[in-house]
Image: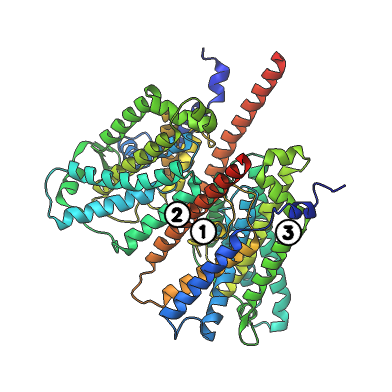
Amino acid sequence: MISVGRIARRSEPYVLAAIVALSVLIQVQSGQFFSGNNLVDLTRSLIVPALFSIACMMVIVSGGIDVSFTAIASLAMYVTDRLLLASNYSGNVMLAYAISAGLGLLMGALNGFLIGFLKLPTLVVTLGTSSLFTGLMFGAFSASASDVPPSIAMHGKQILFTATNAQTGLTSNMPSQIFILIGALILVFFLLRYTMLGRGIYAIGGDETAAERAGFNVRGIKMFLYCFVGVLAGITGIVRISMIAYADPSTMLGMELTVIAAVVLGGTRVTGGLGTLTGTILGVALMTILSNSLILIGIPTYWSRAFTGLVIILGTGITAHQIRSTRRRHARAQKATV
Amino acid sequence: MTNPRSAATIRAAGHTRDPNIPRLLVMLVFVFALMTLLRPNQFATMADFNSMMRQFPEYGIMAIGISLTMITGGIDLGVVGTANLSAIVAAKFLIGSVPQGALPAQVVPYLIIAVLLSLSVGLACGAIAGTLISRFSIPAILATLGTQQLFTGIAIGITNGRPQSRLPLLYSRIGNLELFKFVPISFIIFSVVAVGVGLMLSRARFGTHMYMMGTNARAARYAGLGNNSIILRTYMLSGLLSSVAGLIMMARANSAKADYGAPYTLQCVLIAVLGGIDPNGGFGTITGVTIAILILQFLSSGLNMFNNISNFYRDVIWGGVLILVLVFNKLLSWRAERRAVRKSVA
């Protein structure tokens, strides 16, 4: 049974309301929000953070936190890019995705081994591996912005449709990479909802000991989870460079904070066990609209970072507060039945 | 009748005795010997010691701040943001208020106000983080990721991202004083901080409470400790130490900048973990952290002397060392556990 009270306790409606309010505000201020090209632009800049946020949400649901996915994505795409350039490859772009995903898998497996098998704290491990991967990229591969091989450049030019703003004449292209996001969403939706593995991710986030006693293979689930995050990050790396048409090693670094903020904003419980794809995508949409339109609502660019910090704090604060009040309500209900 | 809450009882139970220290000392000697062998004419010369003593106090003090928060079972990822923000507030005040061509004697009161201002900004930043964690029960990682963004963001906002230079000369002159032309004042400040915090952890009641809360927060609450106030005070202390580090950075660079020292966050977490602070809380000493600071400084000064090693390899080494230390500590604790089980079975 879904009651009004239960809906009010979730964060998705609030995030949705915030998105609607913000869109109307920007529309009133600039008159450009609901134009076709602005909406396409927003979708376009949403693809990469949304892919990251899916991975990040799964980790947070399992009770961990990962700050290394952007480093994995950067190193995986950079090595793939150099490899394909060096071999003068000009075939299908699927090979680029496969290599990058494979490299991501290896790096994710390192995280998974350290976290799942050695039971080391996730934040410290991923801080360490993220420094390791970026250091390797800039040190061993002396990375700097580089061209992309023809197959990736071609892939970037595959456009679904073009939206033109009748007033300003500006055009925006909808990239075909949106299908990768849609595919990832469908895959993860089924994984989380209908497989034992997916339920296991929620179970270990809710209570690891209980999940272990209930027969879940906690080590295996964590290993799978961090490998999956690595694969997704590797794919996202190629999506990114195909959309901007050059391989910039630092283009994704530093994105992890806004992604984590978006995931938490979308109602994923920071201590694990709760979180939805709908909420996550809404959170990413809100963050993207905010960062694309700060100037439109009168916030100077110099203050955008402070604003991000404030959003993280408010978002996590509201979620933490909701959890606490739910717990209190449970405790009261228990007392009443006793 | 012993008071269960007194520091002496805990010490008697061997709570603050740190099994890491001998291991860390061996590592320190090893790194020192290795660098001396590889670079005999450059490493461990008087000039090299002097430059090392100038380098580590700023991040060393922040590492002590992070360590304190980790002992209580949290983490403060906002130390660098706090340091920069408090330094920028002091710099803005000095640039805006000291009249042109003022005599040194006239500048001194301004300097004192600037230092006090910066320390109070540090305390306030710490209080914000502490309140978010204790009153609003936001996990420390997320709360301080947020405050790091917020403080850095405010620092960028009030300076438009530009470095604040043209400070009164007297400030950097005092900040770069050297005792006997050898021991920098920043090193003396670091020593005072390390000894003071170390004594507080091992002797003062507050230090004991921090360990107790870090070991088991629920047990500490049932034992009648005010957890919220312990958390608040710990993060305020960490904020205060960060602002001290900020003042040192400002003296060394003779300017303040919003994004100065960004890699220090990871480096400080690495120092804390290397120094034997348990990321889950409850264990670790300032002696261990101090030795870890020295190990890292030796390593980094030594690496600087190899021209063909890119600076980026330092990231690889920091990340790699951090993970290796974690793995090593884990294996040791597993072995100790197994031995304890075998003993209890026998």
Report the residue marked by disc 1.
B270
Report the residue marked by disc 2.
A128
Residue nearest the observer in this picture, A255 or B53: B53
Residue nearest the observer in this picture, B189 or B255: B189
**Distance (Cα) linking label 3 and label 2:** 30 Å
> Chain ID for label 2?
A
Please, what is the three-letter code of the amino acid marked with disc 2?
Gly
Which residue is at a point 66% across and 45% down the rendered structure image?
Answer: B215
Q: Position of residue A227 (x, y in %)?
A: 35, 41
Mark 2, secondary structure of its residue: helix
Q: Position of residue B253 (x, y in %)?
A: 54, 74
Report the residue marked by disc 3.
B202
For the residues bearing labels 1 and 2, Cβ distance under 8 angstroms: yes
Which residue is at a point 20% across and 38% down the rendered structure image?
Answer: A159
Please, what is the three-letter code of the amino acid marked with disc 3?
Ser
**Distance (Cα) linking label 1 and label 2:** 8 Å
The residue at the far front in this view is B346
Label 3: few (<14), some or many (≥20) within 10 Å?
Answer: many
Please, what is the three-letter code of the amino acid marked with disc 1?
Leu
Residue A326, picture quadrant:
top right
In the rendered structure, find residue B190 and report the number of the disc placed on it.
none
Q: Is residue B156 above or below residue A304?
A: below
**Distance (Cα) linking label 3 and label 1:** 22 Å
Can residue A32 be seen in the rendering of this structure? no
